[in-house]
Image (cartoon, rainbow, N blue to C red):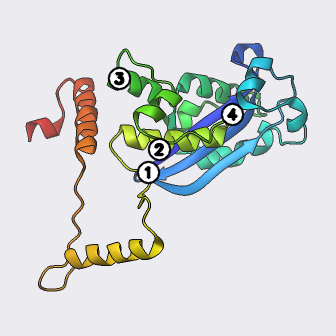
């Protein structure tokens, strides 16, 4: 399963007022693992940037004047996201801006929804945490995802953060961290774990158990899917 976590920064909030994308960042997930492959570009919007937007992302028109225009990166972007499930926080905003940029191409390139399926993590978060704050910052706090280095909003930075939040929300892990262990200590721990996971025949028997938090998050997602399917899900009948 291939997914692409996507975020954009723009010159303003209203796509109907001809505001444009100034930065786009994508992070690839394959089988719920962050692969390290990314797509990232700053873009020349050919227009002024609203003061409020500039305060959010810190990008000025002068800084972006020598960056490529959207039409110059459209083909590799579409190749990167093609066929994947897009994971976006507040998807209508980013998809609306992307579709507007695609319409400006010559010839127009259709709509994002015709190339990819889209999962809106804001909608998912509201289902999982009704009545609570579900901004990306709030979700980082809720799921213990470090965003302390986020002085400004940035498309690639926010896509990376959202990837970790999404994996935490849906019961997975983005990375395995050994905390304060030194390199030698970590090597020793791995050796001890490997020895403990061998039976009398010498064959390695991997044992990976979910934590209580992961089981609870998994059960919550199953309930959401079960509700959406009208109770027709197979695992409840098994």
Tell me, for residue 152, which label it has, or none: 4
| Camera-nearest residue between 75 and 195 | 195
Q: Position of residue 143 (x, y in %)?
A: 40, 37
Q: Earlier in the sequence, mark 1 or mark 2?
A: 2
Q: CA distance from mark 4 to mark 2?
A: 18 Å
Q: Which residue is painted at 67% across and 45% down in the image?
A: 77
Disc 1 and disc 2 in contact, CB within 8 angstroms:
yes
Q: Residue furthest bottom?
A: 201
Q: Residues within 10 Å of mark 1 (few under 14, many from 20)?
A: some
Tell me, for residue 205, which label it has, or none: none
Q: Position of residue 46 (x, y in %)?
A: 87, 28
Q: Earlier in the sequence, mark 4 or mark 3?
A: 3
Q: CA distance from mark 2 to mark 3?
A: 18 Å
Q: Which residue is painted at 70% across and 15% down in the image?
A: 14
Q: Secondary structure at mark 4?
A: loop
Q: Position of residue 68 (x, y in %)?
A: 83, 42
**In this figure, which residue is indicated by the disc labeled 3?**
129
**In this figure, which residue is indicated by the disc labeled 1?**
174
Relative to 56, is 201 on the left or the right? left
Q: Which residue is painted at 53% across and 50% down in the image?
A: 28
Q: Earlier in the sequence, mark 4 or mark 1?
A: 4
Q: CA distance from mark 1 to mark 2?
A: 5 Å
Q: Residues within 10 Å of mark 3 (few under 14, many from 20)?
A: few
Say above or below: 13 vs 37: above
Q: Secondary structure at mark 3?
A: loop
Q: CA distance from mark 4 to mark 3?
A: 26 Å
Disc 4 and disc 2 in contact, CB within 8 angstroms:
no
Give the quarter of the figure containing the C terminus. top left
Disc 4 and disc 1 in contact, CB within 8 angstroms:
no
| Mark 4 or mark 1, whichever is nearer to me | 4
Q: Position of residue 236 (x, y in %)?
A: 12, 36
Tell me, for residue 164, which label it has, or none: 2
């Amino acid at each position: 399963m291939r997914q692409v976590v996507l975020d954009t920064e723009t010159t303003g909030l209203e796509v109907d007022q001809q505001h444009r994308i100034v930065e786009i960042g994508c992070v690839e997930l394959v089988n719920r693992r962050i692969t390290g492959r990314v797509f990232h570009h700053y873009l020349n919007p050919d227009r002024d940037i609203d003061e409020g937007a500039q305060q959010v992302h810190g990008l000025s028109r002068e800084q972006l004047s020598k960056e490529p225009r959207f039409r110059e990166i459209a083909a590799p972007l579409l190749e990167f996201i093609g066929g994947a499930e897009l994971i976006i926080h507040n998807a209508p905003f980013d998809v609306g801006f992307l579709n507007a940029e695609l319409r400006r191409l010559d010839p127009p390139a259709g709509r994002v929804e015709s190339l990819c399926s889209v999962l809106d993590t804001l909608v998912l978060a509201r289902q999982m945490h009704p009545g609570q704050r579900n901004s990306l910052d709030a979700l980082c706090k809720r799921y213990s995802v470090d965003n302390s280095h986020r002085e400004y909003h940035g498309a690639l930075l926010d896509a990376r953060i959202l990837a970790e939040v999404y994996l935490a929300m849906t019961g997975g892990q983005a990375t395995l961290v050994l905390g304060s262990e030194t390199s030698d200590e970590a090597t020793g721990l791995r050796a001890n774990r490997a020895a403990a996971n061998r039976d009398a025949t010498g064959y390695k028997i991997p044992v990976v158990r979910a934590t209580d938090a992961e089981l609870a998050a998994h059960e919550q997602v199953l309930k959401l899917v079960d509700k959406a399917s009208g109770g027709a899900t197979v695992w409840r009948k098994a």
